Image (cartoon, rainbow, N blue to C red):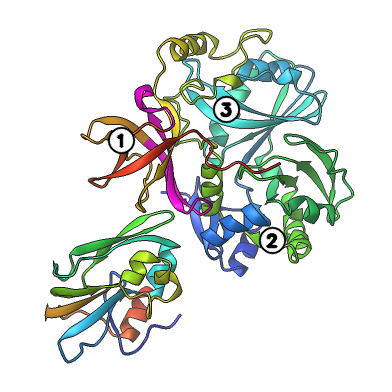
């Protein structure tokens, strides 16, 4: 599987897009994580207006066999949650880097240790 | 030191198919090949192919084999007709369940006991001990069998295309020796999915050939390889108990609502008789928690160990198994629930899912029953 070059990654298998002109970035989980979870059946995403903190849990993804915490890759205010994923959690499996994005965050602080695509690919194997 | 997991005769096949492997009772087993939901639905609507070689086979032979099993198990196995199979249990002297089993009578003086992988050694040890004094030989046959199952409505047609065995004459819960795809097999019409299907016990060296033949025979019928993940959701929908979840040494067959497997009227004494007699009386006079089905109103999935609560938070039970049901499209669970809340349709029952009380509907098991 290939991890898009333009994204940055965490060791918790989230990806983060570049910020737009308003300082807003999109967050999702990687294809590696989606495959490891199996069929995602329930997504609890942070609500619009929530403040999320880098490295802390901000939601959960439930699959057939397990439930996994969702970690925030950066600190900031949630400005949008992907209702399509709430309605159809399988989008996380079928399009983890596209339609299966999870939420958008207006970044106030981001940790230095975000990985490049190549670093993440080396990490996740 | 942990031992390296054991691999089945089909290990290379699973890896070639891209299976996600998982450790299960000391075996490296396929969890899923692709989407477990798709595998589940394939078994419900077409057919699925399973490697179940981790199951534990134990053979009893000799003139006293039937009597030995009558003594060792809660069922009446000497009454089983040759060629038939029975679901039964092995209990401790105190009545707790050591394992649930399927026993096949292969001949007048030959039985095969199939134990869960996680309990195979316990069952082998107990049978060996309990058969002492009977004219019977207990043989550990775990290394001598691979087990392949083909399950689903298309499975009779698929199997017919590769065997001359009389499948139409093979009833549910029966087994007969035959040849499948050129290899010798014990062909059993049993399974753990709620569908019609077959379990094929073969020599490990024949497993690969049989798997490939079934894969080819089933291609047009939509047969797909299936892992343990969908096996669990299939059995859950079918309301079938799983050892370690619904059944434990802390549970008697009566607690699990399976008292019918205990045959008190068989000849001779059997291990657990006294304790099970008391358990039967307890179950009749003061019902313990009952095993019920729960269907979610929402989408959050209950897991084993989660408390079943009323609206005010009073704990009235515990989930033993839970998963999203591909057939129902909702999360479902099996749970032990106090008798006062165990009637189908009881209002106000919730599952505490990591601190949130999610409403659930109480239903009778099973969730799914195939049309016959």
Residue at image location 72% in from the left, 24% down from the top: B137
Residue at image location 51% in from the left, 8% down from the top: B274
Left or right, B151 with reference to B233: right
**Of label 1 and label 2, which has the lower sequence position?**
2
Q: Are marks 3 and 2 on the same chain?
A: yes
- Observer-nearest of B353 and B148: B353
Label 2 environment density (alpha carbons within 10 Å; few <14, some 14–19, many ≥20): many
Magenta segment: B319-344
Q: Position of residue A69 (x, y in %)?
A: 27, 60
Which image quadrant for residue A124? bottom left
In which chain is the residue bearing label 1? B
Which image quadrant for residue A79? bottom left
Which residue carries the number 2 mark? Answer: B223
Q: Which quarter of the rendered picture does the C terminus of chain B lie within?
A: top right
Please check the rendered image and state whether residue A64 is part of the magenta-colored stretch, yes or no: no
Dot 2 falls on a residue whose secondary structure is: loop
**Of label 3 and label 2, which has the lower sequence position?**
3
Q: Are marks 1 and 2 in contact (CB under 8 Å)?
A: no
Select label 3 or label 1 by which is in front. Answer: 1
Dot 1 falls on a residue whose secondary structure is: loop
Is residue A109 visible in this depiction of the protein? no
In which chain is the residue bearing label 3? B
Left or right, B359 with reference to A125: left
Which residue carries the number 1 mark? Answer: B348
**Of label 3 and label 1, which has the lower sequence position?**
3
Label 3 environment density (alpha carbons within 10 Å; few <14, some 14–19, many ≥20): few
Q: Are marks 3 and 1 on the same chain?
A: yes
Residue at image location 47% in from the left, 54% down from the top: B329
Label 3 to label 2: alpha-carbon separation: 38 Å
In which chain is the residue bearing label 2? B
Which residue carries the number 3 mark? Answer: B125
């Amino acid at each position: 599987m290939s991890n898009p070059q333009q994204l940055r990654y965490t060791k918790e298998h989230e990806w983060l897009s570049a910020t737009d002109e308003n300082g807003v970035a999109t967050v999702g989980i990687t294809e590696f994580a989606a495959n490891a979870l199996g069929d995602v059946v329930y997504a609890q995403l942070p609500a619009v207006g929530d403040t999320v903190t880098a490295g802390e849990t901000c939601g959960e993804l439930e699959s057939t066999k397990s439930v996994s915490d969702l970690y925030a890759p950066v600190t900031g205010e949630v400005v949008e949650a992907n209702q399509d994923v709430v309605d159809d959690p399988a989008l996380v499996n079928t399009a983890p880097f596209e339609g299966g994005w999870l939420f958008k965050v207006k970044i106030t602080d981001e940790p230095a240790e975000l990985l490049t695509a190549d670093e993440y690919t080396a990490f996740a194997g | 030191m942990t031992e390296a997991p054991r691999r089945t005769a089909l290990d290379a096949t699973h890896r070639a198919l891209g299976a996600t492997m998982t450790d299960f009772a000391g075996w490296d087993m396929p969890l899923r090949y692709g989407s477990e939901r798709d595998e589940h639905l394939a078994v419900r609507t077409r057919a699925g192919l399973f490697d179940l070689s981790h199951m534990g086979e134990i053979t009893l032979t000799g003139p006293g084999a039937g009597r030995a099993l009558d003594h060792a198990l809660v069922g009446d196995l000497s009454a089983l007709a040759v060629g038939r199979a029975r679901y039964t249990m092995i209990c401790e002297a105190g009545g707790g369940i050591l394992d649930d089993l399927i026993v096949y009578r292969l001949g007048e003086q030959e039985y095969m006991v199939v134990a869960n992988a996680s309990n195979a050694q316990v069952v082998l040890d107990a049978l060996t001990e309990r058969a002492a004094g009977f004219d019977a030989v207990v043989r550990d046959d775990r290394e001598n069998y691979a087990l392949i199952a083909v399950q689903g409505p298309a499975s009779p047609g698929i199997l017919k295309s590769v065997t001359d065995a009389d499948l139409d004459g093979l009833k549910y819960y029966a087994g007969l020796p035959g040849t499948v795809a050129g290899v010798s097999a014990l062909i059993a019409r049993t399974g753990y999915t709620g569908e019609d299907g077959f379990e094929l016990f073969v020599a490990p060296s024949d497993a690969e050939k049989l798997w490939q033949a079934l894969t080819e025979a089933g291609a047009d019928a939509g047969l797909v390889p299936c892992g343990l993940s969908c096996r669990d959701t299939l059995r859950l929908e079918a309301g079938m108990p799983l050892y370690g979840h619904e059944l434990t040494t802390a549970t008697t067959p009566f607690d699990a609502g399976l008292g019918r497997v205990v045959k008190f009227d068989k000849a001779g004494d059997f291990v657990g008789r006294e304790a099970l007699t008391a358990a039967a009386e307890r179950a009749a006079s003061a019902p313990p928690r009952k095993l019920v089905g729960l269907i979610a109103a929402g989408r959050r999935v209950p897991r084993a160990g989660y408390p079943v609560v009323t609206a005010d938070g009073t704990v009235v039970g515990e989930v033993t198994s839970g998963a999203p049901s591909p057939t129902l499209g909702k999360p479902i669970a099996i749970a032990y629930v106090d008798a006062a809340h165990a009637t189908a349709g009881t209002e106000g029952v919730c599952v505490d899912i990591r601190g949130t009380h999610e409403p659930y509907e109480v239903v009778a098991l099973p969730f799914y029953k195939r049309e016959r």
